[in-house]
Image (tube, rainbow, N blue to C red):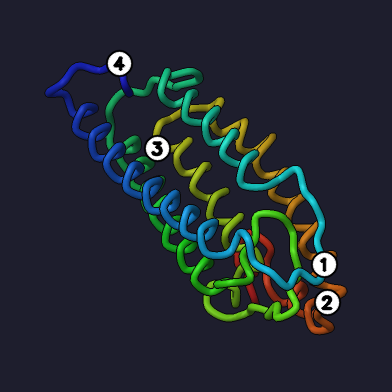
Amino acid sequence: MQNIMLNTPYAVLYLVDNIIVSVCVFIIFLAIIIDFTEFHQRDGIKKEKRSIVETGTMLLFFLSFYLLIRFNIGQIHINFSLPLILLNIFGLLVLIIGCVVNINGRLNLGKNWSNQIKIYDDHAFVSKGVYSFIRHPLYASMIWIFLAASLVYMNYLALLSTIAIFIPFMYYRAKQEEFLLGREFKNYRQYQKDVGMFFPKVKW
Protein backbone atom coordinates (compact mmCIF):
# COMPACT_ATOMS: atom_id res chain seq x y z
CA MET A 1 0.00 0.00 0.00
CA GLN A 2 2.96 2.33 0.24
CA ASN A 3 3.34 2.95 -3.49
CA ILE A 4 -0.05 4.60 -3.86
CA MET A 5 -1.09 8.07 -4.88
CA LEU A 6 -2.18 10.49 -2.20
CA ASN A 7 -5.88 11.47 -2.23
CA THR A 8 -6.91 7.87 -3.09
CA PRO A 9 -8.97 5.60 -0.80
CA TYR A 10 -5.83 3.51 -0.33
CA ALA A 11 -3.99 6.53 1.06
CA VAL A 12 -6.62 7.14 3.75
CA LEU A 13 -6.69 3.47 4.68
CA TYR A 14 -2.90 3.33 4.81
CA LEU A 15 -2.73 6.42 7.03
CA VAL A 16 -5.24 4.97 9.50
CA ASP A 17 -3.35 1.66 9.52
CA ASN A 18 -0.04 3.38 10.25
CA ILE A 19 -1.44 5.47 13.09
CA ILE A 20 -3.05 2.52 14.88
CA VAL A 21 -0.07 0.20 14.34
CA SER A 22 2.40 2.87 15.48
CA VAL A 23 0.46 3.58 18.68
CA CYS A 24 0.25 -0.13 19.54
CA VAL A 25 3.95 -0.70 18.83
CA PHE A 26 4.89 2.33 20.96
CA ILE A 27 2.78 1.12 23.89
CA ILE A 28 4.27 -2.38 23.82
CA PHE A 29 7.85 -1.09 23.49
CA LEU A 30 7.24 1.24 26.43
CA ALA A 31 5.90 -1.68 28.49
CA ILE A 32 8.97 -3.77 27.62
CA ILE A 33 11.28 -0.95 28.73
CA ILE A 34 9.37 -0.63 32.01
CA ASP A 35 9.62 -4.39 32.63
CA PHE A 36 13.37 -4.33 31.99
CA THR A 37 13.83 -1.31 34.24
CA GLU A 38 11.78 -2.74 37.09
CA PHE A 39 12.47 -6.49 37.04
CA HIS A 40 15.50 -7.40 34.91
CA GLN A 41 17.97 -7.33 37.83
CA ARG A 42 15.75 -8.94 40.45
CA ASP A 43 17.40 -10.90 43.25
CA GLY A 44 16.21 -14.16 44.78
CA ILE A 45 16.47 -16.41 41.74
CA LYS A 46 15.57 -19.98 42.70
CA LYS A 47 15.86 -21.63 39.26
CA GLU A 48 17.00 -20.33 35.91
CA LYS A 49 17.14 -21.68 32.38
CA ARG A 50 18.77 -19.80 29.53
CA SER A 51 16.82 -19.62 26.29
CA ILE A 52 17.71 -18.45 22.81
CA VAL A 53 14.19 -17.04 22.66
CA GLU A 54 14.25 -13.79 24.63
CA THR A 55 13.62 -10.11 24.13
CA GLY A 56 16.72 -9.62 21.95
CA THR A 57 15.82 -12.33 19.43
CA MET A 58 12.19 -11.18 19.42
CA LEU A 59 13.39 -7.67 18.54
CA LEU A 60 15.46 -9.11 15.69
CA PHE A 61 12.35 -10.78 14.32
CA PHE A 62 10.42 -7.54 14.71
CA LEU A 63 13.11 -5.69 12.75
CA SER A 64 13.02 -8.20 9.87
CA PHE A 65 9.20 -8.11 9.92
CA TYR A 66 9.25 -4.31 9.82
CA LEU A 67 11.65 -4.26 6.86
CA LEU A 68 9.36 -6.58 4.89
CA ILE A 69 6.46 -4.20 5.50
CA ARG A 70 8.46 -1.00 5.04
CA PHE A 71 9.91 -1.96 1.66
CA ASN A 72 6.83 -3.81 0.36
CA ILE A 73 8.70 -7.12 0.13
CA GLY A 74 5.99 -9.73 -0.28
CA GLN A 75 3.14 -7.26 -0.53
CA ILE A 76 0.00 -8.45 -2.32
CA HIS A 77 -1.65 -5.80 -4.47
CA ILE A 78 -5.42 -5.95 -4.26
CA ASN A 79 -7.92 -3.55 -5.79
CA PHE A 80 -9.66 -1.29 -3.30
CA SER A 81 -12.96 -2.94 -2.40
CA LEU A 82 -15.34 -3.67 0.45
CA PRO A 83 -13.75 -7.10 1.21
CA LEU A 84 -10.36 -5.39 1.49
CA ILE A 85 -11.77 -2.81 3.90
CA LEU A 86 -13.39 -5.54 6.01
CA LEU A 87 -10.14 -7.55 6.12
CA ASN A 88 -8.29 -4.43 7.10
CA ILE A 89 -10.73 -3.61 9.90
CA PHE A 90 -10.57 -7.21 11.16
CA GLY A 91 -6.77 -7.09 11.18
CA LEU A 92 -6.74 -3.79 13.08
CA LEU A 93 -9.21 -5.12 15.66
CA VAL A 94 -7.08 -8.22 16.26
CA LEU A 95 -3.98 -6.04 16.53
CA ILE A 96 -5.63 -3.76 19.11
CA ILE A 97 -6.89 -6.77 21.09
CA GLY A 98 -3.36 -8.19 21.02
CA CYS A 99 -1.98 -4.92 22.38
CA VAL A 100 -4.56 -4.81 25.19
CA VAL A 101 -3.93 -8.47 26.12
CA ASN A 102 -0.16 -7.91 26.13
CA ILE A 103 -0.35 -4.96 28.53
CA ASN A 104 -2.85 -6.72 30.78
CA GLY A 105 -0.66 -9.83 30.79
CA ARG A 106 2.32 -7.78 31.94
CA LEU A 107 0.27 -6.16 34.68
CA ASN A 108 -1.01 -9.57 35.86
CA LEU A 109 2.48 -11.06 35.74
CA GLY A 110 4.05 -8.17 37.63
CA LYS A 111 7.39 -8.92 39.25
CA ASN A 112 7.33 -12.53 37.99
CA TRP A 113 8.41 -11.21 34.57
CA SER A 114 11.93 -12.01 33.37
CA ASN A 115 13.83 -11.86 30.11
CA GLN A 116 15.25 -15.35 30.60
CA ILE A 117 13.31 -18.20 32.19
CA LYS A 118 13.47 -17.76 35.97
CA ILE A 119 11.69 -19.02 39.04
CA TYR A 120 12.08 -16.64 41.98
CA ASP A 121 11.99 -17.43 45.68
CA ASP A 122 8.71 -15.51 45.94
CA HIS A 123 7.44 -16.61 42.53
CA ALA A 124 3.64 -16.65 42.30
CA PHE A 125 1.51 -18.93 40.16
CA VAL A 126 -0.46 -16.41 38.10
CA SER A 127 -3.82 -17.62 36.82
CA LYS A 128 -5.91 -14.46 37.11
CA GLY A 129 -6.89 -11.84 34.54
CA VAL A 130 -5.89 -12.77 31.00
CA TYR A 131 -4.03 -15.78 32.43
CA SER A 132 -7.41 -17.28 33.24
CA PHE A 133 -8.05 -17.94 29.54
CA ILE A 134 -4.54 -17.95 27.98
CA ARG A 135 -1.46 -19.54 29.58
CA HIS A 136 1.00 -17.29 27.75
CA PRO A 137 -0.74 -13.98 26.97
CA LEU A 138 2.50 -12.11 26.25
CA TYR A 139 3.55 -14.61 23.56
CA ALA A 140 0.01 -15.17 22.32
CA SER A 141 -0.63 -11.45 21.92
CA MET A 142 2.56 -10.98 19.91
CA ILE A 143 1.55 -13.86 17.63
CA TRP A 144 -1.84 -12.24 17.10
CA ILE A 145 -0.22 -8.85 16.44
CA PHE A 146 2.19 -10.18 13.81
CA LEU A 147 -0.54 -12.19 12.10
CA ALA A 148 -2.85 -9.17 12.15
CA ALA A 149 -0.17 -6.82 10.80
CA SER A 150 0.49 -9.27 7.95
CA LEU A 151 -3.20 -9.04 7.10
CA VAL A 152 -3.42 -5.27 7.50
CA TYR A 153 -0.49 -4.70 5.13
CA MET A 154 -1.37 -7.63 2.85
CA ASN A 155 2.13 -9.11 3.05
CA TYR A 156 2.44 -12.84 2.45
CA LEU A 157 6.15 -13.00 3.40
CA ALA A 158 5.42 -11.36 6.74
CA LEU A 159 2.65 -13.92 7.28
CA LEU A 160 4.86 -16.88 6.30
CA SER A 161 7.74 -15.71 8.51
CA THR A 162 5.35 -15.39 11.45
CA ILE A 163 3.99 -18.90 10.91
CA ALA A 164 7.33 -20.57 10.08
CA ILE A 165 9.64 -18.74 12.50
CA PHE A 166 7.93 -16.69 15.19
CA ILE A 167 5.21 -19.13 16.26
CA PRO A 168 7.59 -22.15 16.57
CA PHE A 169 10.00 -20.01 18.60
CA MET A 170 7.20 -18.88 20.91
CA TYR A 171 6.05 -22.48 21.32
CA TYR A 172 9.59 -23.57 22.17
CA ARG A 173 9.99 -20.82 24.77
CA ALA A 174 6.55 -21.51 26.26
CA LYS A 175 7.32 -25.23 26.65
CA GLN A 176 10.63 -24.40 28.35
CA GLU A 177 8.78 -22.22 30.86
CA GLU A 178 6.07 -24.78 31.45
CA PHE A 179 8.62 -27.45 32.27
CA LEU A 180 9.93 -25.38 35.20
CA LEU A 181 6.50 -24.15 36.25
CA GLY A 182 5.14 -27.69 36.24
CA ARG A 183 7.89 -28.79 38.62
CA GLU A 184 7.45 -25.76 40.88
CA PHE A 185 3.65 -25.63 41.19
CA LYS A 186 1.70 -28.85 41.72
CA ASN A 187 -1.52 -27.41 40.27
CA TYR A 188 0.13 -26.21 37.06
CA ARG A 189 -0.55 -29.45 35.17
CA GLN A 190 -4.26 -29.08 35.75
CA TYR A 191 -4.00 -25.45 34.66
CA GLN A 192 -2.42 -26.65 31.38
CA LYS A 193 -5.40 -28.92 30.77
CA ASP A 194 -7.95 -26.22 31.51
CA VAL A 195 -6.41 -23.20 29.77
CA GLY A 196 -5.19 -22.85 26.18
CA MET A 197 -1.56 -21.99 25.41
CA PHE A 198 -1.97 -19.26 22.78
CA PHE A 199 -5.71 -19.26 22.16
CA PRO A 200 -8.63 -19.63 24.58
CA LYS A 201 -10.00 -23.15 24.81
CA VAL A 202 -13.51 -23.62 23.53
CA LYS A 203 -15.54 -25.38 26.23
CA TRP A 204 -18.64 -27.15 25.06
Q: Amino acid at mark 4?
A: Asn
- 151 sits left or right of 142 in the view: left
Q: Mark 2 or mark 3, which has the lower sequence index?
A: 3
Q: Earlier in the sequence, mark 2 or mark 1?
A: 1
Q: CA distance from mark 1 to mark 3?
A: 41 Å
Quarter of the image where the C terminus is located: bottom right
Q: Secondary structure at mark 1?
A: strand
Cα–Cα span, label 2 and label 1: 10 Å
Q: Where is residue 138 drawn, in percent x and y? A: 57, 59
Q: Which mark is residue 47?
A: 1
Q: Which mark is residue 152?
A: 3
Nearer-the-camera pick, 46 or 200: 46
In the rendered image of this protein, does residue 88 appear above or below residue 186?
above
Q: Residue at x 44, y 52 (%)?
A: 28
Q: Earlier in the sequence, mark 4 or mark 1?
A: 4
Residue at image coords 65%, 39%: 57
- Secondary structure under tag 2 reads helix
Q: Nearer the viewer, residue 53 or 200?
A: 53
Q: What residue did someone put label 4 on?
A: 3
Residue 105 drawn above or below residue 31: below
Decide if residue 94 is in sight here.
no
Callout 3 secondary element: helix
Residue drawn where x is 48% and y is 35% of the image: 150
Mark 3: few, some, or many residues within 10 Å (few <14, many ≥20)?
many
Count neighbours of disc 4 (C-alpha within 10 A) and say few if under 14, some if 14 to 19, many if 20 or more.
few
**Earlier-in-chain disc, 2 versus 4:** 4
